[in-house]
């Protein structure tokens, strides 16, 4: 089947999507896609003897980049806009753009044009050859070699998957779950937390946002309240159970059409792991080591619960973990998380992040929030800030970064970084600058207190900032390789490496300050935090195993028909030491299921490389500009312009090793 040309754009689009989606999508998105289709028609029509890299592959790369530039902010509003109508319009835009991208991968005329160029065996520079190779690979993976009938069915599946994934994510973001408790039921929850909660008829309203839910789990002495909150949190977006099962079935059908045994093999083919066997071996090698630490953790936490309750037959439940971890921190290590947060007001953390990364990477930040309108960039809420990032030596603008840091209703409710616009060097030498957005849900300021971040929120902020810098400090020519456009099981390495800075005395001394007195974090408190760093690390690592192996189990069933709740319970039983909890749906609100598709293992996989890369900073100094410049040039600047493993070997000067990773988890001799 030959797909229609851009001249019949609207007819083709109606065949791919609903009239409603077109009607709801903003006109700028429809116009951008029409223009892109026209450009692709022009690429396909170039005579064979006039075809070059620049007018074919280079031009196609720019068309895709231009679609991102023209539509991404509109689509992004579904995750952050306070306006329901704008969110709905953004979802319609997302549906339209996703279906357009799917359609592009099925265009025979464009594929023939690219193949025609490839058959000339042109002499290309390394990044150009990589772009050509990846484009041909991606066409094969998109079904270009299938029969017309199978290709048409694959396209139907991909369009339906796009719609279902948007619905899945929306159900999580807009889940309305709220609980109401008396003050007695919230015994132990600090007044600083209670003071920011809404009240009705003497009851406190508990939302499922991270700061509120996390504070209740850490501090509430009433086990039944913790249990109710935990169950509500794990039953959010329950309608997603049926959705994810439909998604998994469709993914399996698509993978089968393409000749893969399952979705995991399809997804991992283009990643560092290369196949599911490597992932299975990775988990198999780690699990015995981690289980030993998890057993020690479970014994320690269970003993704390029994001592606290005076009940020496008590078992540790999953909703007890945060409470008894907090209790052990206070009693054994003299670390009070509420007191620690007083030394991390948001203003100081932001300044600290800017100062540290400026020193490391030779960059400077300028707040241009007031000029956003002049830059043609929207501010969707009063909490949003916009920064420009410049190279200190050359004064060149490198890119821009949004921050949207506090929770609100209907906003994306975790922490994430969006690459909104890629870097691209244009034929005339001008550079399209990258734009990225950090979306978080940190503790909000109140009338009498600024936003005070618990240390784990500081760590999360550094993590997401690592993603942001990966997007902004890229120096690639082609948009396809911009920033975090790397293998998916490497993408978390720069962000996880960035977490190490919040555990370093020298670094914390630079920006921790009490929100009232300005005093730095006391040495005694910091020493306790450092000693307690691996408290519960076995249990927490096994939880990551659970998520990764649940994701794998969902996507390796031979039939594609998965009872996800039963499978989730089975995986929980084999990876965790807790008893599984009936009627809980971890997977319904696990947003990574739509993006990772059997490859969530990448979080743990990339942590190996994160810790290995960080060793250079430990050797040269965590604030060493020399180490920072080397890392910026060798890793961040290169984006996805070369294989991640080759980039790592070049950066490390050797093959990657697991030693630093095992040390990080507390599984080596160096404690």
Image: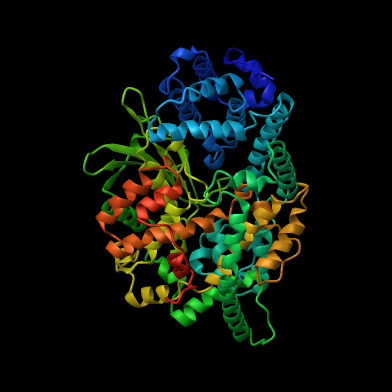
* Residue at position x 73%, y 50% in the image: 241
Work out whether residue 246 or residue 185 is closer to the camera in this orientation and state it: 246
Work out whether residue 512 or residue 664 is closer to the camera in this orientation and state it: 664
Q: Position of residue 34 (x, y in %)?
A: 55, 18
* Residue at position x 41%, y 39% in the image: 641
Is 4 left or right of 486, judged from the image as shown? right
Task: Decide: is 162 above or below 658.
Answer: above
* Residue at position x 37%, y 60% in the image: 614
Work out whether residue 367 or residue 315 is closer to the camera in this orientation and state it: 315
Q: Residue furthest left?
A: 393
Instruction: State whether residue 452 appears in this view.
Output: no
Work out whether residue 151 or residue 68 is closer to the camera in this orientation and state it: 151
Instruction: State whether residue 403 appears in this view.
Output: yes
Q: Quadrant of the N terminus?
A: top right
Is 458 left or right of 82, judged from the image as shown? left
Name the image colouring. Answer: rainbow
Report which quarter residue 96 is drawn in.
Answer: top right
Task: Decide: is 243 above or below 49.
Answer: below
Report which quarter residue 219 is drawn in.
Answer: bottom right
Is 514 left or right of 11, judged from the image as shown? left
Task: Decide: is 642 above or below 155.
Answer: below
Q: Quadrant of the C terminus?
A: bottom left
Q: Position of residue 593 (x, y in %)?
A: 63, 49
Q: Position of residue 586 (x, y in %)?
A: 67, 57
Q: Position of residue 399 (x, y in %)?
A: 35, 38
* Residue at position x 26%, y 42% in the image: 391
Q: How many marks?
A: 0
């Amino acid at each position: 089947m030959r797909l229609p040309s851009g001249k019949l754009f609207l007819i083709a689009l109606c065949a791919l999507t609903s009239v409603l989606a077109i009607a709801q999508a903003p006109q700028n998105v429809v116009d951008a896609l029409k223009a892109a289709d026209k450009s692709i028609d022009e690429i396909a029509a170039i005579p064979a003897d006039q075809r070059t890299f620049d007018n074919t592959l280079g031009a196609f790369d720019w068309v895709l980049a231009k679609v991102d530039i023209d539509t991404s902010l509109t689509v992004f509003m579904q995750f952050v806009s306070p306006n329901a109508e704008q969110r709905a319009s953004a979802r319609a835009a997302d549906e339209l753009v996703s279906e357009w991208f799917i359609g592009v991968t099925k265009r025979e005329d464009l594929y023939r044009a690219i193949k025609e160029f490839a058959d000339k065996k042109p002499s290309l520079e390394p990044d150009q050859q990589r772009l050509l190779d990846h484009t041909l690979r991606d066409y094969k993976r998109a079904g270009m070699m299938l029969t017309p009938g199978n290709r048409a069915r694959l396209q139907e599946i991909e369009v339906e998957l796009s719609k279902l994934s948007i619905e899945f994510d929306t159900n999580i973001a807009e889940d309305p779950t709220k609980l109401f408790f008396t003050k007695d039921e919230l015994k132990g929850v600090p007044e600083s937390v209670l003071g920011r909660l809404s009240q009705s008829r003497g009851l406190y309203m508990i939302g499922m946002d991270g700061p509120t839910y996390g504070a209740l789990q850490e501090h509430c002495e009433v086990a039944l309240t913790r249990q109710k909150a935990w169950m509500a949190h794990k039953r959010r977006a329950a309608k997603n159970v049926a959705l994810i099962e439909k998604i998994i079935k469709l993914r399996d059908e698509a993978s089968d059409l393409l000749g893969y045994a399952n979705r995991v093999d399809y997804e991992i083919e283009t990643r560092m792991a290369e196949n599911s066997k490597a992932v299975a071996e990775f988990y198999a090698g780690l699990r015995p080591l981690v289980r030993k630490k998890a057993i020690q953790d479970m014994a320690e936490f269970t003993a704390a619960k029994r001592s606290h309750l005076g009940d020496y037959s008590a078992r540790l439940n999953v909703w007890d973990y945060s409470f008894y971890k907090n209790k052990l921190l206070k009693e054994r290590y003299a670390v009070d998380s509420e007191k620690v947060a007083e030394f991390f007001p948001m203003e100081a953390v932001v300044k600290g992040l800017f100062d540290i990364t400026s020193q490391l990477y030779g960059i400077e930040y300028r707040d241009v929030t007031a000029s956003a309108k002049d830059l043609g960039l929207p501010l969707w809420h009063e909490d949003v800030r916009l920064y420009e990032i410049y190279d200190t030596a050359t004064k060149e603008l490198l890119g821009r970064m949004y921050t949207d840091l506090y929770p609100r209703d209907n906003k994306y409710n975790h922490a994430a970084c969006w690459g909104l616009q890629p870097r691209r060097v244009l034929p005339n030498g001008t550079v399209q600058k990258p734009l990225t957005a950090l979306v978080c849900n940190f503790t909000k300021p109140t009338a009498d207190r600024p936003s005070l971040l618990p240390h784990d929120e500081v760590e999360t902020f550094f993590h997401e900032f690592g993603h942001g810098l990966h997007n902004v400090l890229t120096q690639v020519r082609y948009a396809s390789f911009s920033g975090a456009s790397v293998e998916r099981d490497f993408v978390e390495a720069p962000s996880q490496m960035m977490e190490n800075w919040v555990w370093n005395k020298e670094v914390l001394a630079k920006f921790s300050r009490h929100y009232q007195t300005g005093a730095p974090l006391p040495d005694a408190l910091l020493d306790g935090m450092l000693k307690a760093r691996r408290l519960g690390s076995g249990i927490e690592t096994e939880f990551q195993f659970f998520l990764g192996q649940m994701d794998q189990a969902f996507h390796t069933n031979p039939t594609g028909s998965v009872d996800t709740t039963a499978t989730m319970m089975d995986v929980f039983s084999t990876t965790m030491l807790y008893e599984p909890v009936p009627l809980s749906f971890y997977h319904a609100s696990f947003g990574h299921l739509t993006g990772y598709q059997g490859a969530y293992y990448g979080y743990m996989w990339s942590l190996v490389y994160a810790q290995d890369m960080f060793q250079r900073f430990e050797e040269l100094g965590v604030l060493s500009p020399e180490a920072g410049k080397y890392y910026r040039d060798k890793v961040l600047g290169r984006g996805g312009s070369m294989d991640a493993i080759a980039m790592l070997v070049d950066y490390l000067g050797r093959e990657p090793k697991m030693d630093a990773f095992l040390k990080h988890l507390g599984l080596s001799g160096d404690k």
